[in-house]
Image (cartoon, grey):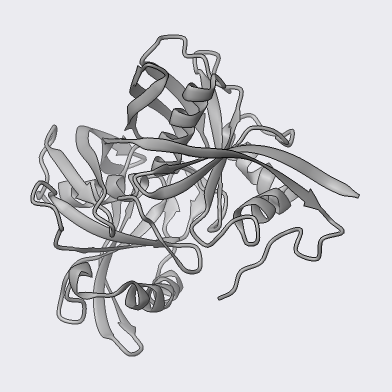
Amino acid sequence: MLRGTFFCIDAHTCGNPVRLITSGHPVLQGNNMSEKRQDFLLHHDWIRKALMFEPRGHDMMSGAFLYPPIDAAADGAILFVETSGCLPMCGHGTIGVVTAALEAGFIHPKRPGSLLLDVPAGQIKIDYVMEQGKVLWVKIYNVASYLAYEDIIVTVPGLGELQVDIAYGGNFYIIVEPQINFPGIQHWSAAQILHYSPLVRSLINEKVEPIHPQDPTVRGASHLLWTGSAKNADSDGANAVFYGDKAIDRSPCGTGTSARMAQLFAKGQLALQQDFVNESYIGSQFVGRAESVCQVGNISGILPSIKGWARVTGQNCIRVDDDDPYAFGFQVI
Protein backbone atom coordinates (compact mmCIF):
# COMPACT_ATOMS: atom_id res chain seq x y z
CA MET A 1 0.00 0.00 0.00
CA LEU A 2 1.34 3.43 -0.90
CA ARG A 3 1.61 5.47 2.29
CA GLY A 4 2.04 8.89 0.72
CA THR A 5 3.56 11.15 -1.91
CA PHE A 6 5.13 14.37 -0.68
CA PHE A 7 6.07 17.29 -2.90
CA CYS A 8 8.86 19.40 -1.40
CA ILE A 9 10.89 22.52 -1.97
CA ASP A 10 14.46 22.10 -0.76
CA ALA A 11 16.51 25.06 0.41
CA HIS A 12 19.27 25.96 2.81
CA THR A 13 19.56 28.74 5.36
CA CYS A 14 23.15 29.95 5.64
CA GLY A 15 24.28 26.41 4.80
CA ASN A 16 21.82 24.31 6.82
CA PRO A 17 19.11 22.37 4.93
CA VAL A 18 15.40 23.15 5.02
CA ARG A 19 12.77 21.01 3.30
CA LEU A 20 9.40 22.74 2.93
CA ILE A 21 6.85 19.94 2.54
CA THR A 22 4.09 21.29 0.31
CA SER A 23 1.72 18.31 0.19
CA GLY A 24 0.63 15.38 2.34
CA HIS A 25 -0.23 17.52 5.37
CA PRO A 26 -1.89 15.40 8.08
CA VAL A 27 -5.00 16.86 9.66
CA LEU A 28 -3.93 17.85 13.16
CA GLN A 29 -6.09 18.15 16.26
CA GLY A 30 -5.60 20.98 18.73
CA ASN A 31 -6.49 24.57 19.54
CA ASN A 32 -2.99 25.92 18.97
CA MET A 33 0.25 24.83 17.30
CA SER A 34 1.64 23.45 20.56
CA GLU A 35 -1.33 21.06 20.82
CA LYS A 36 -1.08 20.24 17.10
CA ARG A 37 2.61 19.47 17.60
CA GLN A 38 1.68 16.93 20.26
CA ASP A 39 -0.94 15.38 17.97
CA PHE A 40 1.61 15.08 15.16
CA LEU A 41 4.11 13.37 17.44
CA LEU A 42 1.46 10.95 18.69
CA HIS A 43 -0.16 10.00 15.39
CA HIS A 44 1.92 11.13 12.42
CA ASP A 45 5.59 11.00 13.40
CA TRP A 46 6.26 8.39 10.70
CA ILE A 47 6.13 11.25 8.18
CA ARG A 48 8.95 13.07 9.95
CA LYS A 49 11.07 9.94 10.10
CA ALA A 50 10.42 9.02 6.47
CA LEU A 51 11.27 12.47 5.11
CA MET A 52 14.09 13.50 7.44
CA PHE A 53 16.09 10.30 8.03
CA GLU A 54 18.04 8.31 5.47
CA PRO A 55 17.59 7.25 2.70
CA ARG A 56 15.42 10.29 1.81
CA GLY A 57 17.14 12.65 4.19
CA HIS A 58 20.30 12.72 6.29
CA ASP A 59 21.55 13.55 9.77
CA MET A 60 21.32 17.33 9.29
CA MET A 61 17.94 17.32 7.53
CA SER A 62 15.38 19.81 8.78
CA GLY A 63 11.93 20.49 7.40
CA ALA A 64 8.53 22.00 7.98
CA PHE A 65 4.86 22.03 7.00
CA LEU A 66 3.07 25.30 6.35
CA TYR A 67 -0.48 25.30 7.78
CA PRO A 68 -3.35 27.82 7.86
CA PRO A 69 -3.08 30.26 10.78
CA ILE A 70 -4.56 29.62 14.20
CA ASP A 71 -5.01 33.34 14.89
CA ALA A 72 -7.21 35.11 12.32
CA ALA A 73 -4.74 38.00 12.31
CA ALA A 74 -1.84 35.72 11.33
CA ASP A 75 -0.68 34.81 7.82
CA GLY A 76 0.09 31.15 8.44
CA ALA A 77 1.40 28.54 10.85
CA ILE A 78 4.50 26.33 10.80
CA LEU A 79 5.04 22.82 12.12
CA PHE A 80 8.77 22.01 12.33
CA VAL A 81 10.12 18.52 11.71
CA GLU A 82 13.74 17.40 11.75
CA THR A 83 15.95 14.50 12.76
CA SER A 84 15.94 15.66 16.39
CA GLY A 85 12.15 15.75 16.61
CA CYS A 86 9.22 18.10 16.14
CA LEU A 87 10.60 21.33 17.55
CA PRO A 88 8.70 24.11 19.33
CA MET A 89 10.59 26.66 17.23
CA CYS A 90 13.32 26.65 14.59
CA GLY A 91 14.99 29.88 13.46
CA HIS A 92 16.89 28.67 10.42
CA GLY A 93 13.84 26.62 9.47
CA THR A 94 11.58 29.68 9.63
CA ILE A 95 13.93 31.71 7.43
CA GLY A 96 14.04 28.86 4.90
CA VAL A 97 10.28 28.22 4.97
CA VAL A 98 9.42 31.91 4.57
CA THR A 99 11.87 32.26 1.68
CA ALA A 100 10.69 29.14 -0.15
CA ALA A 101 6.98 29.78 0.50
CA LEU A 102 7.06 33.42 -0.62
CA GLU A 103 9.06 32.67 -3.77
CA ALA A 104 6.70 29.81 -4.70
CA GLY A 105 3.53 31.78 -3.89
CA PHE A 106 2.41 29.46 -1.09
CA ILE A 107 1.88 32.31 1.33
CA HIS A 108 0.16 35.64 0.65
CA PRO A 109 1.03 38.28 3.27
CA LYS A 110 -1.69 40.56 4.50
CA ARG A 111 0.98 43.28 4.47
CA PRO A 112 3.84 42.96 1.95
CA GLY A 113 7.18 42.86 3.74
CA SER A 114 5.71 41.52 6.98
CA LEU A 115 4.25 38.26 8.27
CA LEU A 116 2.66 37.02 11.47
CA LEU A 117 3.12 33.28 12.00
CA ASP A 118 1.82 30.82 14.60
CA VAL A 119 4.41 28.24 15.74
CA PRO A 120 4.33 25.68 18.56
CA ALA A 121 6.39 28.01 20.79
CA GLY A 122 3.97 30.90 20.32
CA GLN A 123 3.60 33.60 17.70
CA ILE A 124 6.38 35.32 15.78
CA LYS A 125 6.54 38.41 13.59
CA ILE A 126 8.59 38.42 10.40
CA ASP A 127 10.07 41.21 8.30
CA TYR A 128 11.50 40.43 4.87
CA VAL A 129 12.68 42.07 1.66
CA MET A 130 11.72 40.57 -1.69
CA GLU A 131 12.99 41.84 -5.04
CA GLN A 132 12.27 40.42 -8.51
CA GLY A 133 10.76 37.28 -7.06
CA LYS A 134 13.65 36.56 -4.68
CA VAL A 135 13.67 36.94 -0.91
CA LEU A 136 16.90 38.75 0.01
CA TRP A 137 16.67 38.37 3.78
CA VAL A 138 14.27 37.45 6.59
CA LYS A 139 14.19 38.90 10.10
CA ILE A 140 12.45 36.93 12.86
CA TYR A 141 11.12 38.58 16.00
CA ASN A 142 11.41 35.45 18.09
CA VAL A 143 9.60 34.16 21.15
CA ALA A 144 10.62 35.28 24.63
CA SER A 145 14.03 33.90 25.59
CA TYR A 146 15.70 33.57 28.96
CA LEU A 147 18.56 32.14 30.98
CA ALA A 148 17.20 29.10 32.81
CA TYR A 149 20.20 27.70 34.75
CA GLU A 150 23.72 28.93 35.51
CA ASP A 151 26.96 27.20 36.42
CA ILE A 152 25.91 23.56 36.26
CA ILE A 153 28.96 21.32 36.74
CA VAL A 154 29.28 17.87 35.22
CA THR A 155 32.23 15.50 34.83
CA VAL A 156 32.49 14.21 31.27
CA PRO A 157 34.31 10.90 30.62
CA GLY A 158 37.51 11.50 28.70
CA LEU A 159 37.23 15.27 29.07
CA GLY A 160 36.87 16.17 32.73
CA GLU A 161 34.83 18.81 34.51
CA LEU A 162 32.69 21.26 32.52
CA GLN A 163 30.66 24.23 33.74
CA VAL A 164 27.64 25.08 31.60
CA ASP A 165 24.54 27.26 31.46
CA ILE A 166 21.11 26.42 30.02
CA ALA A 167 19.12 29.07 28.14
CA TYR A 168 15.87 29.03 26.18
CA GLY A 169 15.43 30.61 22.77
CA GLY A 170 12.59 28.50 21.38
CA ASN A 171 14.40 25.30 22.46
CA PHE A 172 16.58 24.70 25.51
CA TYR A 173 20.32 24.98 24.88
CA ILE A 174 23.22 23.75 26.97
CA ILE A 175 25.82 26.50 26.48
CA VAL A 176 29.50 25.62 26.87
CA GLU A 177 31.98 28.49 26.92
CA PRO A 178 35.80 28.12 26.69
CA GLN A 179 37.30 26.88 29.95
CA ILE A 180 40.07 24.60 31.21
CA ASN A 181 38.74 21.43 29.57
CA PHE A 182 37.23 23.09 26.50
CA PRO A 183 39.53 25.48 24.58
CA GLY A 184 36.82 26.76 22.21
CA ILE A 185 35.40 25.53 18.92
CA GLN A 186 38.33 26.97 17.00
CA HIS A 187 40.51 24.27 18.59
CA TRP A 188 38.07 21.38 18.24
CA SER A 189 37.31 19.23 15.24
CA ALA A 190 33.78 18.32 14.18
CA ALA A 191 34.54 14.78 15.35
CA GLN A 192 35.24 16.01 18.89
CA ILE A 193 31.98 18.00 18.95
CA LEU A 194 30.04 14.96 17.74
CA HIS A 195 31.73 12.71 20.30
CA TYR A 196 31.31 14.83 23.44
CA SER A 197 27.93 16.45 22.78
CA PRO A 198 25.75 13.38 23.47
CA LEU A 199 27.73 12.69 26.65
CA VAL A 200 27.28 16.23 27.96
CA ARG A 201 23.59 16.28 27.00
CA SER A 202 22.91 13.03 28.80
CA LEU A 203 24.74 14.13 31.96
CA ILE A 204 22.95 17.49 32.06
CA ASN A 205 19.51 15.98 31.53
CA GLU A 206 20.17 13.51 34.34
CA LYS A 207 20.99 16.44 36.62
CA VAL A 208 18.28 18.98 35.72
CA GLU A 209 15.14 19.05 33.61
CA PRO A 210 14.39 22.51 32.23
CA ILE A 211 10.64 23.02 31.74
CA HIS A 212 9.11 26.04 30.07
CA PRO A 213 6.99 27.84 32.69
CA GLN A 214 4.17 28.53 30.22
CA ASP A 215 4.17 25.24 28.27
CA PRO A 216 5.17 22.08 30.19
CA THR A 217 5.34 20.08 26.94
CA VAL A 218 8.55 22.00 26.20
CA ARG A 219 11.07 20.30 28.43
CA GLY A 220 14.58 18.89 28.42
CA ALA A 221 17.80 20.32 26.97
CA SER A 222 18.01 18.91 23.46
CA HIS A 223 20.73 21.10 21.91
CA LEU A 224 24.39 21.79 22.73
CA LEU A 225 25.86 25.20 21.91
CA TRP A 226 29.67 25.21 22.00
CA THR A 227 31.23 28.67 21.73
CA GLY A 228 34.61 30.05 20.77
CA SER A 229 36.47 32.51 18.59
CA ALA A 230 35.03 33.64 15.26
CA LYS A 231 36.58 33.30 11.82
CA ASN A 232 35.20 36.64 10.56
CA ALA A 233 36.41 39.97 11.90
CA ASP A 234 32.86 41.38 11.96
CA SER A 235 31.42 38.53 14.05
CA ASP A 236 30.73 39.13 17.74
CA GLY A 237 30.53 35.45 18.59
CA ALA A 238 30.71 31.96 17.16
CA ASN A 239 29.11 28.66 17.96
CA ALA A 240 28.80 25.05 16.88
CA VAL A 241 25.31 23.79 17.66
CA PHE A 242 24.80 20.04 18.07
CA TYR A 243 21.35 18.50 17.66
CA GLY A 244 19.78 15.14 16.99
CA ASP A 245 22.16 12.21 17.31
CA LYS A 246 25.08 13.45 15.24
CA ALA A 247 24.27 16.78 13.59
CA ILE A 248 26.16 20.07 13.70
CA ASP A 249 24.15 23.07 12.54
CA ARG A 250 25.71 24.61 9.46
CA SER A 251 23.86 27.87 10.15
CA PRO A 252 24.49 30.02 13.25
CA CYS A 253 21.17 28.61 14.60
CA GLY A 254 18.29 31.03 15.16
CA THR A 255 16.92 29.68 18.44
CA GLY A 256 20.50 29.03 19.58
CA THR A 257 21.47 32.62 18.84
CA SER A 258 18.37 33.74 20.77
CA ALA A 259 19.35 31.57 23.75
CA ARG A 260 22.93 32.84 23.60
CA MET A 261 21.76 36.47 23.60
CA ALA A 262 19.42 35.79 26.52
CA GLN A 263 22.35 34.31 28.45
CA LEU A 264 24.68 37.21 27.62
CA PHE A 265 22.01 39.79 28.45
CA ALA A 266 21.27 38.17 31.82
CA LYS A 267 24.99 38.30 32.63
CA GLY A 268 25.34 41.96 31.63
CA GLN A 269 27.43 41.16 28.55
CA LEU A 270 24.92 42.32 25.91
CA ALA A 271 22.96 45.56 25.85
CA LEU A 272 19.46 46.18 24.54
CA GLN A 273 19.31 47.15 20.87
CA GLN A 274 22.92 46.04 20.41
CA ASP A 275 23.62 43.95 17.31
CA PHE A 276 25.11 40.53 17.98
CA VAL A 277 26.59 39.00 14.84
CA ASN A 278 26.77 35.28 15.46
CA GLU A 279 28.81 32.90 13.34
CA SER A 280 28.28 29.23 12.55
CA TYR A 281 30.85 26.44 12.45
CA ILE A 282 31.29 27.07 8.69
CA GLY A 283 31.51 30.86 9.11
CA SER A 284 27.99 31.90 7.96
CA GLN A 285 26.35 34.67 9.99
CA PHE A 286 23.06 35.75 11.57
CA VAL A 287 22.53 39.24 12.95
CA GLY A 288 20.82 39.04 16.32
CA ARG A 289 19.54 41.73 18.65
CA ALA A 290 17.95 41.90 22.10
CA GLU A 291 14.97 44.03 21.11
CA SER A 292 13.36 44.48 24.55
CA VAL A 293 12.98 42.93 27.99
CA CYS A 294 10.07 40.71 28.98
CA GLN A 295 8.82 38.25 31.58
CA VAL A 296 8.46 34.52 31.04
CA GLY A 297 6.37 33.50 34.01
CA ASN A 298 8.38 34.96 36.89
CA ILE A 299 11.68 34.88 34.94
CA SER A 300 13.18 37.97 33.31
CA GLY A 301 14.13 37.53 29.68
CA ILE A 302 14.40 39.24 26.32
CA LEU A 303 12.49 39.41 23.07
CA PRO A 304 15.22 38.70 20.50
CA SER A 305 15.40 39.11 16.74
CA ILE A 306 17.46 37.16 14.21
CA LYS A 307 18.16 38.21 10.63
CA GLY A 308 19.49 35.84 7.97
CA TRP A 309 19.03 34.55 4.43
CA ALA A 310 18.11 31.35 2.60
CA ARG A 311 18.36 30.05 -0.97
CA VAL A 312 16.11 27.54 -2.73
CA THR A 313 18.11 24.63 -4.16
CA GLY A 314 15.44 22.59 -5.92
CA GLN A 315 12.16 20.71 -5.87
CA ASN A 316 11.45 17.05 -5.42
CA CYS A 317 8.68 14.50 -5.11
CA ILE A 318 9.20 11.89 -2.41
CA ARG A 319 7.22 8.65 -2.33
CA VAL A 320 6.86 6.66 0.88
CA ASP A 321 5.72 3.11 0.23
CA ASP A 322 5.49 0.64 3.11
CA ASP A 323 6.62 -2.17 0.81
CA ASP A 324 10.04 -0.52 1.14
CA PRO A 325 11.89 -2.03 4.15
CA TYR A 326 13.37 1.45 4.77
CA ALA A 327 10.10 3.32 4.21
CA PHE A 328 10.25 5.02 7.58
CA GLY A 329 13.93 5.89 7.59
CA PHE A 330 17.01 4.87 9.51
CA GLN A 331 20.17 6.31 11.01
CA VAL A 332 23.69 4.92 11.05
CA ILE A 333 25.09 6.02 14.42
Residue 141 place in picture, x, y as percent: 32, 30
Side of 63 where 177 appears, left or right: left
Q: Is residue 154 above or below residue 93?
A: below
Residue furthest bottom in the image: 158
Residue 137 place in picture, x, y as percent: 31, 29
Q: Does residue 325 show up?
A: yes
Q: How many marks?
A: 0
Side of 265 where 249 appears, left or right: right
The quarter of the picture where residue 240 lies is bottom left
Side of 128 where 103 appears, left or right: right
Q: Residue at x 54, y 19 (%)?
A: 105
Task: State which quarter of the image contains the C terminus.
Answer: bottom right
Q: Residue at x 44, y 29 (%)?
A: 99
Q: Nearer the viewer, residue 165 or 315?
A: 315
Residue furthest right in the image: 1
Q: Nearer the viewer, residue 198 or 47?
A: 47
Residue 30 place in picture, x, y as percent: 67, 33
Q: Nearer the viewer, residue 145 or 136?
A: 136
